[in-house]
Amino acid sequence: MNFQFEIKKFIEVYSSNQQPIVQFRFRKLKEMNDYYSAKGFPLPCSILQLSLLPAYFQEAIYDGINWSDQNAGLEQLEKELQLDCIFHNAGKTRKELSLKEFRDYIKFSDVAINQAKH
């Protein structure tokens, strides 16, 4: 997956839709892209406020997507959840992470989701 190409594609698609959840996703993707453009990938699992999971986990749960399983099919959220993983794991996809790296990523994502609720 080409990280820059995919994130820019989502930003373009989401930019014109004014629905609140779409605008939330747009802002998250834009912030992530801005950081990446300026500094590259951050240290693994280090920037909670740039996690995309708070913008997608409700859809994943509603649609029965087990996003916390490393080998689960991510259905319509495949690209978005991969973008998040790649960004927060120095360019590695979900399948490229070791079991420990993936567990750390899931813990990080849980914290990001819970932090966004408050």
Image (cartoon, rainbow, N blue to C red):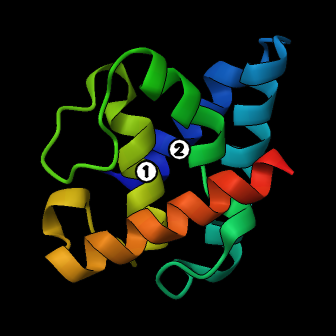
Query: What residue lies at 41% left-to-right and 43% top-to-bottom?
Result: 81
Query: What residue lies at 65% left-to-right and 37% top-to-bottom?
Result: 55
> Can you tell which of label 1 and label 2 is closer to the viewer?
1
Callout 1–callout 2 Cβ contact below 8 Å = yes
Q: Is residue 12 left or right of residue 62?
A: right
Mark 1 element type? helix
User: For the view shown, which residue lies furthest in the bottom direction?
Assistant: 43
Query: What residue lies at 57% left-to-right and 27% top-to-bottom?
Result: 58
Query: What residue lies at 81% left-to-right and 11% top-to-bottom?
Result: 19
Residue 56's place in the image compared with 51, above or below, is: above
**Amino acid type of the residue that numbered disc 2 sits on in the rendered structure:** Ile
Q: Is residue 23 left or right of residue 33?
A: right
**Amino acid type of the residue that numbered disc 1 sits on in the rendered structure:** Leu
- CA gap, disc 1 and disc 2: 7 Å
| Residue 78 image-quadrant placement | top left
Q: Is residue 56 visible?
A: yes
Compare residues 35 and 74 and report the one nearer the observer: 74
Query: In the rendered image, which residue does mark 2 sit on?
Result: 7
Q: Position of residue 33 (x, y in %)?
A: 65, 57
| Residue 22 image-quadrant placement | top right
What numbered label is drawn on residue 83? 1
Q: Is residue 101 left or right of residue 6?
A: left
Residue 31's place in the image compared with 79, above or below, is: below
